[in-house]
């Protein structure tokens, strides 16, 4: 290598490293201005997650085609990153010969490297085919995507050309360790020595420039996740269902309205988005043409952070009006569109959280600015005055139990179970039938249970998810004190939203209870032979998985176990299990008018129609109401919507 060539490589290297260091300093500087949190617990569990989800890419493999080619490219990048640095340092220090210092290990590495170059090129070909000829709707063809694939392909090809020409020119001792490069070298055998040297030097410079150029391109592209993904997976929320952040009601400022209100993990989320579009594929807001698209929400805030100085992010300097988050960068309609169904978080291969950010905006609007949809006020007043969002008399809470021998929990002796009826179970006509059916089931299985009656308040699920933490805290503290007063062994509820709130959200206020959904509880009763069912239902049946039972609680098996005992004609929906599409009621949306786009419950019910089922089963009172309303509004009266608990009660009683 001539002095001029060596000098140029040093100039390229110093410039690239200086530019990269400046960019990373800005990225880290912004992150350090955010709110501090400490997700450093359970290091072994976190490391296991990094291996499982980052290195083995378990979530990506849900889509086998994309998962496989991404694995090819990822693992190739892991192995070839060392090759890139080795090439750079051997060029900077010609006598270094880094691989030779590793002896046989260096030769083994060259063999693996040679094979992985081909694997990566195959992965790029598969990726290009998908983007050009078989592109799913969620995937956007951007300059960034093709430019990155081009960068990687250039690195691979220039590496092969450099090694292949070196083999002809120098016949190095490592040549037998590079089967692919050796094979390709025959293509250059007829080229003259001077041309071969020029090609070798040119390929080397292309490789170094592409490698260092790619290093500096990454922080400005969606592929910044190459640096951040391992950290994002490691610092992921280990309690995925616990995704609503407690609001400090003694603070002077509530929720998220400024960049500094985000945590540093939120910033890391923004940096890590791969723009794969998996989050929008089953997002009910996106599917129903609402303004919320999780990917765009996160990327918009990422771009905002990139455009701000550290002083603006940290609050030392005022942010220009056009860059204010709520109302300018992110519309209020976007914020209120979320159903908190967590499809986006379940689908994201790198554990990016969206729900706590959106509910953080709602907390700011509701608590600090008293700016929320008018319809929510009815639910808030009802919860505050009567302990239920319908604002119906507290004295009517036990009318559902007329004619049934239901005890107050205080009358139950020994190990006792609390049946948490819920507001829908006590006041909503269709759900009253479900509550009565559940009581009959529990009585048939000799479960020692009781209810709170008029002592039961709304759990506050909708209040919290609509941003009213003050009201939620009031209800939570009252309910926790009441429940603790009766020393119950376990709480049973037919409402997944009550389940989530009692089991997870109440931990923020000192409530640590064992809570089980009724379907899960019934499945266990059957397994223990405490319930005997008569399976005579031959209608074509399907099951709509509630978001708060499937994705929050993680139970999709219990309903199917029960159905295997009582239904001879069960058919899964295309979007089912943890992939289920929301009915549109979550996140307090049940109480809000749907004024933008299509109706989510219509969208979901049409999927049931496409399935051809005669009987659509649910496991949530809100899903029940939403889908039954859609049935009538769409004129599909021939399809019956029913809670699975009612079907079980019929099977028990016909036995």
Image: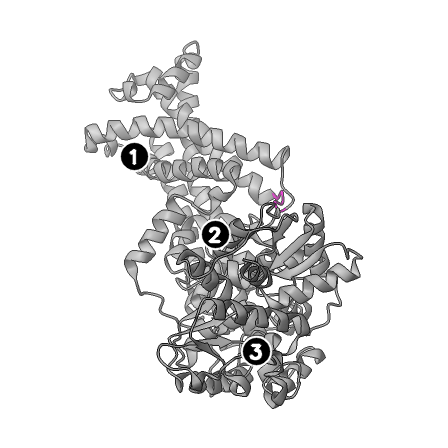
Residue plotted at (28% across, 22% down): 177
- Mark 3 or mark 1: whose residue is earlier in sequence: 1
Question: Is residue 107 left or right of 198 when viewed as pictured?
Answer: left
Tell me residue 535's x, y (percent): 56, 51
Per the image, the residue denoted by label 3 is 404
Q: Which residue is mark 1?
A: 90
Mark 3 nearby-residue class (10 Å; few <14, some 14–19, many ≥20): few
Which callout, 3 or 2, points at the residue further toward the start of the chain?
2
Predominant SS along the magenta part: loop
Q: Which residue position holds label 2? A: 219
Pointers 2 and 1 in contact (CB under 8 A)? no
Q: Nearer the viewer, mark 3 or mark 1?
A: 3
631 drawn magenta:
no
Secondary structure category for the residue under label 2: helix
In the image, taking residue 535 as reference, residue 251 lies left or right, namely left
Q: Residue furthest top?
A: 190
522 or 496: nearer the viewer: 522
Residue 33, x across and y down, in percent: 44, 70
Q: Residue at x 60, y 69 (%)?
A: 434
Badge 1: how crowded within 10 Å, few (<14), some, or many (20+)?
Answer: some
Q: Does the residue at mark 3 contact the one at mark 1 (Cβ under 8 Å)?
A: no
Q: Residue furthest front?
A: 655
Residue 638 appears at what percent x and percent y?
A: 76, 54
Which numbered disc covers residue 336? none
Whether 140 is among the magenta residues is yes
Q: Which residues are magenta?
A: 138-142
Of the 4 image quadrants, the one containing the C terminus is bottom right
- Look at 42% across and 54% down and name the residue there: 228
Label 2 or label 1, whichever lies nearer to me, is 2
Answer above or below: position of 281 versus 71.
below
């Amino acid at each position: 290598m001539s002095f001029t060539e060596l000098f140029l490589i040093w100039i390229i290297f110093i410039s690239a490293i200086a530019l990269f260091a400046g960019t990373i300093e800005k990225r880290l500087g912004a992150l350090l201005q955010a709110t501090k949190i400490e997700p450093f617990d359970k290091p072994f569990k976190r490391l296991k997650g990094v291996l499982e989800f980052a290195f083995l890419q378990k979530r990506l493999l849900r889509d086998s085609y994309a998962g496989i080619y991404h694995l090819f490219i990822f693992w190739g990048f892991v192995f070839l990153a060392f090759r890139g640095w080795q090439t750079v340092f051997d060029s900077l220090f010609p006598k270094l010969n880094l691989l030779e210092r590793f002896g046989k290990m260096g030769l083994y590495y060259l063999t693996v490297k040679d094979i992985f170059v081909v694997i990566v090129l195959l992965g790029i070909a598969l990726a290009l085919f998908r983007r050009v000829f078989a592109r799913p709707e969620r995937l956007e063809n951007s300059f960034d995507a093709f430019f990155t694939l081009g960068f990687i392909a250039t690195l691979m090809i220039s590496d092969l050309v450099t090694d292949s020409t070196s083999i002809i020119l120098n016949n190095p001792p490592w040549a037998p360790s590079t089967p692919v490069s050796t094979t390709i070298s025959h293509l250059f055998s007829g080229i003259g020595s001077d041309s071969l040297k020029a090609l070798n030097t040119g390929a080397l410079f292309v490789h170094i420039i592409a490698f260092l150029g790619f290093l500096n391109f990454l922080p400005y592209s969606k592929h910044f996740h190459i640096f951040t993904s391992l950290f994002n997976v490691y610092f992921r929320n280990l309690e995925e269902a616990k995704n609503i952040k407690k609001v400090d009601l003694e603070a002077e400022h509530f929720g998220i309205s400024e960049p500094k209100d985000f945590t540093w993990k939120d910033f890391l989320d923004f940096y890590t988005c791969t723009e794969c579009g998996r989050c929008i594929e089953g997002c009910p807001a996106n599917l129903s043409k609402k303004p919320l698209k999780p990917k765009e929400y996160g990327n918009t805030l990422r771009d905002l952070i990139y455009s701000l100085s550290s002083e603006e992010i940290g609050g030392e300097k005022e942010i220009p009006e056009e860059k204010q988050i709520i109302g300018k960068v992110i519309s209020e309609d976007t914020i209120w569109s979320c159903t908190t169904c967590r499809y986006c978080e379940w689908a994201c291969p790198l554990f990016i959280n969206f729900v706590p950010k959106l509910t953080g905006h709602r907390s700011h609007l509701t608590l600090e600015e008293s700016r929320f949809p008018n319809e929510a006020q009815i639910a808030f007043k009802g919860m505050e005055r009567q302990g239920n969002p319908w604002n119906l008399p507290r004295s009517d809470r036990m009318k559902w139990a007329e004619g049934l021998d239901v005890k107050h929990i205080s009358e139950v002796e020994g190990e006792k179970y609390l049946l948490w009826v819920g507001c829908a179970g006590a006041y909503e006509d269709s759900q009253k039938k479900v509550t009565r059916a559940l009581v009959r089931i529990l009585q048939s299985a000799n479960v020692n249970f009781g209810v709170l009656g008029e002592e039961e308040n709304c759990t506050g699920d909708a209040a919290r998810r609509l941003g009213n933490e003050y009201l939620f805290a009031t209800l939570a503290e009252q309910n926790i004190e009441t429940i603790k007063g009766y020393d119950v062994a376990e709480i049973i509820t037919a409402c997944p939203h009550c389940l989530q709130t009692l089991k997870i959200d109440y931990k923020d206020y000192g409530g640590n209870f064992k809570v089980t959904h009724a379907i899960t509880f019934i499945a266990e009763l059957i397994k223990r032979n405490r319930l005997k069912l008569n399976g005579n239902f031959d209608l074509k049946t399907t099951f709509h998985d509630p978001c708060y039972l499937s994705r929050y609680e993680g139970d999709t098996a219990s309903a199917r176990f029960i159905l295997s005992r009582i239904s001879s004609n069960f058919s899964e929906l295309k979007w089912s299990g943890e992939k289920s599409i929301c009915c549109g009621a979550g996140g307090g949306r049940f109480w809000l008018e749907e004024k933008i786009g299509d109706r989510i419950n219509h969208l979901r019910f049409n999927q049931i129609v496409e399935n051809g089922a005669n009987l659509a089963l649910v496991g949530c009172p809100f899903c029940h109401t939403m889908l039954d309303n859609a049935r009538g509004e769409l004129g599909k009266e021939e399809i019956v919507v029913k809670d699975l608990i009612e079907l079980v009660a019929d099977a028990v009683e016909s036995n």
